[in-house]
Image: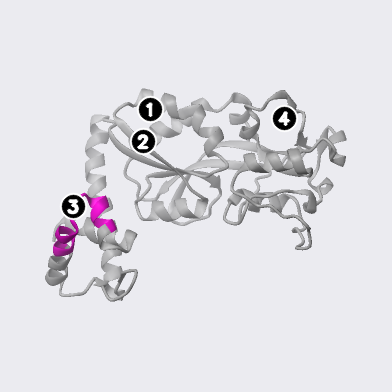
Amino acid sequence: MTLTQLEYIVAVDDKRHFAEAAKICFVTQPTLSMQIQKLEEQLGVQIFDRSQHPIAPTQLGQAIINQARVVLNEAKKLKESVHTAREDLTGELKIGIIPTLSPYLLPLFITAFIDTYPQINVEVQELITEQIIEKIEKNQLDVGIIVTPAEHSTLLEYPLFYEEFVAYLSFDHPLFKKLEVAPGDIKLEDVWVLNEGHCFRNQVLNICKPRKSETEKFRFECGSLEALKKIVDYHHGLTLLPELATLDMADKELDKIRTFSSPVPVREVSLVAHTSFVKKAAIEALYNSIKAAIPDNISSKKSKKIIRWK
């Protein structure tokens, strides 16, 4: 049994396809299949049911794959301990970030981080929260940048900052005349929201209760805050935005922003990693880089009211 064989069965479990697994392992399919077959013969069990489409692990095979992930992670820890001892920040760092943070937070820190740590190869994936957690659990991501608390037993959470929610209104909306708004002022039927799966949608619905009815003549849900802003601009109504989304707004857009009266709803943004994460030095460097890049008026906040996404 070799680490390479374990990497192969994990890759097949991830892709559920031998040819796709071979591609990400940079080997030919016959080589990958032969090594997996050898492992099955050594263990005396069938790891994959090849009659299923897509291919799937057997019940015993899934237990073996789960243990293989543990073994591979421990092997990574061994390598990382050497890098840590040398204070050697090298290798890959795979980061997942949610869409309502990605376009606003990444530009603040990513260039400086790459310039400061040129030996780290950074890969960033924009994913919803559930996908980030799943990939961290499968060791397909090293760290995530999400809204917390996630309340997930396998995750360690490192709060970065707290950002307020603001309302973005059309010029003809009744609330436009107010300097501040309260959650009770907002009619949910006026609010444009992200589609299912986005934690920001849940946060907005938590603020603006009760839930939207199903009788509206026009309903639009998407995965982009920028698209929701355009709908407000051209179809009236309002949407809620995170504070970072307002930093680069033009004056005409800022005129449409209304802050909330106290207590101001905020969301907690954190780095999250697996409880057994191995790239401690790189993740610590990433944490410090993000903290240093956040504007002081945001990084210094810690509201008593945190909108949970569950």
**Left or right of residue 59, residue 104 in this image:** right
For label 1, the residue is 114
Circles 2 and 1, Cβ within 8 Å, touching? The answer is yes
Residue at which label 4 appears: 253
Q: Secondary structure at mark 4?
A: helix
Q: Nearer the viewer, mark 2 or mark 3?
A: 3
Residue where numbered disc 3 is placed:
27
- Count residues near mark 1 (Cα–Cα under 10 Å), then give few for <14, some for 14-19, many for 20+: some
**Residue 290 magenta-drawn?**
no
**Marks 4 and 3, Cα distance to the nearest angstrom?**
52 Å
Q: Which mark is residue 122?
A: 2
Q: Secondary structure at mark 1?
A: helix
Q: Secondary structure at mark 2?
A: strand
Q: Are marks 1 and 3 in contact (CB under 8 Å)?
A: no
Residue found at x 63% / y 28%: 247
Marked residue nearer the N-terminal end (1 or 3): 3
Q: Which residues are magenta?
A: 20-35
Q: Determine whether, in the image, residue 242 is placed left or right of residue 183.
A: left
**Residue 67, visible in the rendered structure:** no
| Percent position of residue 136, x then y | 40, 51
Considering only order in the chain, which callout, 1 or 2, is on the residue closer to the N terminus?
Answer: 1
Disc 4 versus disc 1: distance between alpha carbons?
Answer: 32 Å
In percent of width and height, residue 32 lies at 18, 59
User: In this picture, is 69 found above or below 99?
Assistant: below
- Residue contact at pointers 2 and 3, CB within 8 angstroms: no
In this rendering, the label closer to the viewer, 2 or 4:
4
Q: Could you say where residue 201 lies in the image, as x and y percent from the top left?
A: 64, 51
Magenta-colored segment: predominant secondary structure: helix
> Looking at the image, which residue is at 55% across and 39% down?
101
| Looking at the image, residue 231 lies above or below residue 216 | above
| Amino acid identity at mark 1 | Ile
